[in-house]
Structure formats: C-alpha cells, structure tokens
Amino acid sequence: MNTTIKVTGMSCASCSSRIERTLMKIDGVESVNVNLAAGIASVSYSGAVTDSFIMEKIRELNFGAEPLEKVDPEKDKKDAQKREKRQLISLIVSVVLTLPLIAGMVLNWLGIHNSFVMILHNRYFQLILATPVQFIIGFPFYKGSYHSLKSKSPNMDVLIALGTSAAYFFSIYNIISGSVSGMNGLYFESSMTIITLILLGKYLETKAKSKTSSAVDKLLDLQVKNAHLYVDGEITDICVDNVKKGDILVVRPGETIPLDGEIIYGSSDINEAMLTGESTAVFKESGASVYGGTLNISGGFRLKVTASKDETALSNIIRLVRDAQGNKAPIQRLADKISAVFVPAILIIAILTFVLWLVFTGDITRAVINAVSALVIACPCSLGLATPTAIMVGTGLGAENGILIKGGEELENTSKTDTVIFDKTGTITEGKPVVTGFYAFDCDENKLISAAAAAESLSEHPLGTAIYNYAAEKNMALPEVSEFTAYAGKGISASVGGERLILGNKRLMDELGIPSCGYAEKPDKTTIYAASSRILGVFEIADTVKKTSAEAVSRIADMGIDIVMITGDNDAVANSIAREVGIKTVISEVLPGGKADEIKKLQSNGKKCAMVGDGINDAPALAQAEVGIAMGNGADIAIEASSITIPGGDLLLVPASIKLSKLTMRKIRQNLFWAFIYNSIGVPFAALGFLSPVIAGGAMALSSVSVVSNSLLLKRKKIK
C-alpha cells in the first residue's frame, strides 16, 4: 500500500528527517520519503499499518497531517495565505521592537550621546522591548525545540532558541551582577536581531517556495467547478463533482472543457496546450475525444462524459506532478545523512567553542558571544531545501511544456543518459500507416480486400488498421469473422466466411510453409501478405515520418548522445526511415518482447539507456531502460511503465526532457555546493570569533533564501 500525506509545520531538514526516522520504526512500513519543500510525505507499507495510524504518529511529533487527496486546494491556498500573513505580522512587530535598539547601537557608533540615545541605551528599556520578541514572537522556536527534544531529534529551532536565550539571559545576568556599562554587557539587540532576521528569512523563503509549486496551482486552476448538463433538450448548471460517466454536457465557445469526453454533436477548435504544451488549436468534430482543462475556442458542441473528475487526464497529470515534486533524487541521500547528525554536531561545536574560549582567554563574555554565533549561523534548512526546491521547479517547468516527469530519481537518471533508443512506429513515424499499393494473384480483388479488412478489424496493430481503413474508404461490406489468432510481431489468421485467411509478413509465411509468389518487396514499404494455402495478394503499406523527428534526432546527437532505432520492421523499411531522420544505428525485425532484451545488451556494455516508445506495446522496454519516455495522448498512455510521459507525442520534447534534467541536476549540485560551503566556512568562522551573532543570524537567514532563489532561476530557462 502507498499513501501520500500533506504535512504542515516542518521548519528544517531535521524535521523531515525526524518524521522519516519515526515512521521507519513502525513494523510494516517499507519506505518513507518526506519532502520539506513540498510538505509531502510518501509512505509505502504493508500488514496491519493504516493511513490513520501513520498520520497519528506524525501528529504526535507536533506536525499537521492529512491525506493529500482530501486536501481542498482552495482551503489549502487560503491556509497558506493565513500562515504567510501571520509570519508577516510577527516580522513587522519584531522589526518595530528591534529598530530602537539597532538605532541606539548605530547612534553610539556615530558618537551621538544625547538624552534620546541614553533612553535607547537604558537597560530596562531594552529589557522591556526584548522580552516580547524573545518569548512571544520567538515562542514557536521554543515550542519546536521542546517537541524535537522530546522525540530525541533536535532541529534548527533548538539552535535558535539556545543561541537567542544565551544572549538574552547573559544580558540579564550582567544587569543583576552590575556588569553593565553603557552598551557594554547588553546583548538584547543581538537576540532580537537574530530572531528578526530569521523571521525575515523564513518569510522570504515561504514567498519563494510558494512560487516553486506554481505549476500545480496552474493545473488546479484549470479544473472547472461547474458544467452545463444536457437532458432532453434542457440545460442545467451543476457541480462537476456530480457529473457521472455517460452524462451529456454542453460546452460553449470560450469555455474550458469540464471533463474528458467524446464529441457527439458539433465541432470546434480546441487549445490543448495544458495537455501537449502546444498552443496551436486542434480541430475536433463528432467522434473525437476532448479532455477536461483544455479550452474550447470557436464552436459549441455536446460531449458524452467518459471520465469522472478524479479520472480525467488533467487529474492524472496533477497527481503525477505532485508525486514528482514529493520524490527525492538519489543525490539527496548525502544531504539527508548530514542533516540527521547536523544539529547535535553544532551543539557539540557550540559547547566546545564556549569552553575553549573561556579556558584560553578567561573572557566569559567572548566565550558566550562566539558560542551564540556558532549556534545561529548553522542552517540545516539550506541542505534540506537544496534538492526538493530544484525538483519542484524542474518538474513544474516540464509540466508547463508538456513533459510529465515521475520524480527526482527519474530526473537524475535522465541527466545521465548516454543512449536514446527510439521505437519506430508511432514514435518516429506518425503511427498511422496507409495502404499505398495492392496486388491480387488469381483471385477476386475486392473479395480479398474485404476479407482482409474483416480479419484486421479484430487487430489493434497499426498495419491492420491501415488495411481496415483501405476497405472502409472503398465502402466495402465486411464478412463475418471467427477463430481469430494473433502472431506477435508477425501477423494474424482468422476464419472469414468459412475460409481460413492468413495476413502477415514474410517471416510468418515462411514459418507456416506457404510458398513464395515471387513478389519483390520494396525497401521503403512494409509488405503484408494475404494467404490461405498459397499467397493470394500483397498489401504495400507505408508510414510517414513525423515533422519533428529529424530535428529531435539532430538535437539529441548534438548533446553527444548515441541514438538507436529499434523496430519489428524488416531491414529495408527500417533503414529507409532511419536515413530519413538521420539515425545511423538500426536494430530491425525485433519482436515486441525482444526490445527489452536488446536494451539489456546495451546496458551490459555500460550504456545508460532511455527508451522512447508509444507506452503500450513498448511497456517492457520502457520498464527495462533506466529511463522510459512514453509518447501518447495522456489519457490511455502506460504511465506506470515510464519515467517520463509526453502526452502530446511531440518528439522535440525528448531532447527537451534531457536538457531539463541536466539543468535541474546542475541547480541541485549548485545548491548542495553552496549549502555545504556555507556551513563549512560559516561555522568555523563563527566559532573562531570572526562573526558577531547579528551577522551570523543574517547569514543563516539568507542561506535558505539563496538556495530557493537559485532554484527559481530554472524558470527562466528555455528547454525547447
């Protein structure tokens, strides 16, 4: 079983690590993945474990938890806005109370010592201002510290609470002991400034993080709340939640289509950019499928609903993007390991800093200040945000361009791809082959065509569809069919009008011992033989190459990636298509089940493979490759077998996917580098006395903001 839970109240990487460790201790829980940036916990479990039990364990750690699917997007957005507003109010109050102390410090530096400045320096005046900042505005830090220490997993709140409390109570100690002289001996401004700067950093971080999830928000905005129900000539507006499969809806010009369905009356131009990433309108008429969330531009029509709200292509895309943003990349594991021991390590460093400065200098004031600096400059948040924020922006950018990526691991694997394997039919080609020639040998031509079309009417293969359409264009009546048999990758046989008819390639003819008729196959055509005990006729079939195939292949080659085409077609046809699009390596006459074996051979030679296929017949190969890229229409595509889904089927999005993965991984490495460097340099500098608590607090606050902001720069990148 798998469950995805919305978690609120996490403040740093230690929080997400604490949830993961707690849940992994539960018998039956197999894996846990908590994404700090997205606020999502993905849990796999078996046995007697339940969703409610898992959520209760999370709540015991003082975090909010509820099933993600039950989260009302509108309410969630409003709650987030309320939290952001509370953050802003706390920040403003903290700034107002802190500014007088900062002003007094600055004026003292400037040599101004009038009566107003003396009031600002007054110890009791400072105590009055500092106390509400420390214990009211700063209360969440104490609360977070209590719960983290209670669960034996200290987090960032512990560092902040300890550091600011040390400065606050050391000032009170100096007041009581009479050690205060002017500004000397008072460190209220340090504790207040640290809290204010951290609040500022958290507020900016919240604002920035909200932008990383904008892709999901945009998709959610596409979901229509009401629909026009058509019953017996009357139109009634009802909530989309109440619409059932089979209902008839009316869609007017300029409206967003509410649900997936089939047009049964009327026609229109449809903007399917949300599904395909392409803004060019597509003309749809009676019998065509339309998808919820796409925009009806010109005409009005009626549609028959084929999917409920939770089953639409748009709902599937939203789920996929959310899951992707909640998953971690393998590169995150190092940061997770460090975050797990980060806070305890910083506490030890702070204690050692205090003891060593006190022992070697005898200056307790200097010892306290440097220990406080070491506490407040440390920031596990930047480590925890480095990977998930980049993944959220990267997967969101992909979704906006018609690329649906399963998650961080898939992104990382895609960035390592050195070999791309293309299926031919429906991937490089349109997948809609047509009969370009037909020859009958000593038999009734029309009777053979109608018999072949009748047999192929039971086949789902594109070549069979071409033969069926060929007869349909001639308005031929089709005879009855029985005893249908399919030979994978070779052809079919059936009883048509009481006579056995075999349709297939030369390999099938040879295996069944049907003698050759002397027909010379053409290199640029696919040949389908029609036979009984002898060959009765030949269908010549050709498939057209997609307009974007050659350019897509060229772009991938420019990245230094090897390209292979794999197909069940014969050598001549395969090589003809390959030459047209610029592919040099071709593996032909491969049965559907053999494609995965061919990928295994490449992998055994150390290749990192990405398989590009139609997502249905190529499912084993898509699953075998390190990266499976499924091309399709978003509604019937085999998403489970693929790492990346391209609903619109645009082949140019394959190189765009690789480019996006490389850009995202580059951002992740940059984020991790700066997070590691920041802590590696900042903590020793603070411990050695080179940084004041105020500067340390400011640096700590800005570190997380810088990581999130760097991730947001991905939005400016063009991937197509």
Image (cartoon, rainbow, N blue to C red):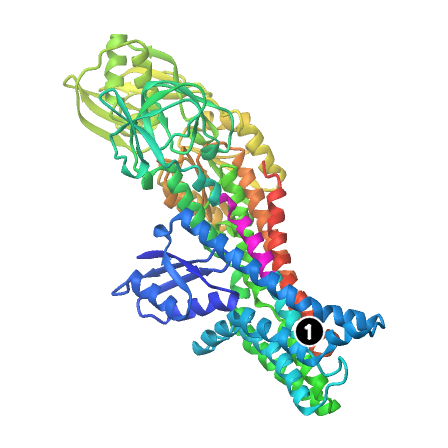
In this orientation, which residue lies closer to the viewer: 543 or 74? 74
Compared with 304, 171 (above or below) is below
Q: Give the magenta-colored segment's residue range.
A: 201-215
* Left or right, residue 81 beside residue 189: left
Secondary structure state at the residue bearing disc 1: helix
- Of all residues, the one furthest to the right in this rendering is 111
Q: Is residue 210 magenta?
A: yes
Residue 623: horizontal and vertical position, in percent?
A: 40, 46
- Occupied quadrant, residue 94: bottom right
Which residue appears at 37% of the width and 45% of the height?
640
Q: Amino acid at mark 1?
A: Glu
**Dominant secondary structure (helix, strand or loop) of the stretch shown in magenta:** helix
* Left or right, residue 602 beside residue 59: right
Compared with 520, 411 (above or below) is below
* Left or right, residue 33 beside residue 509: right
Which residue is denoted by mark 1 in the rendering? Answer: 189
- Occupied quadrant, residue 695: bottom right
Which residue appears at 22% of the width and 21% of the height?
232
Residue 700: horizontal and vertical position, in percent?
A: 64, 66
Q: Is residue 274 magenta?
A: no
Which residue appears at 60% of the width and 35% of the height?
555
- Occupied quadrant, residue 453: top left
Residue 335: horizontal and vertical position, in percent?
A: 55, 65
In this orientation, which residue lies closer to the viewer: 519 or 61? 61
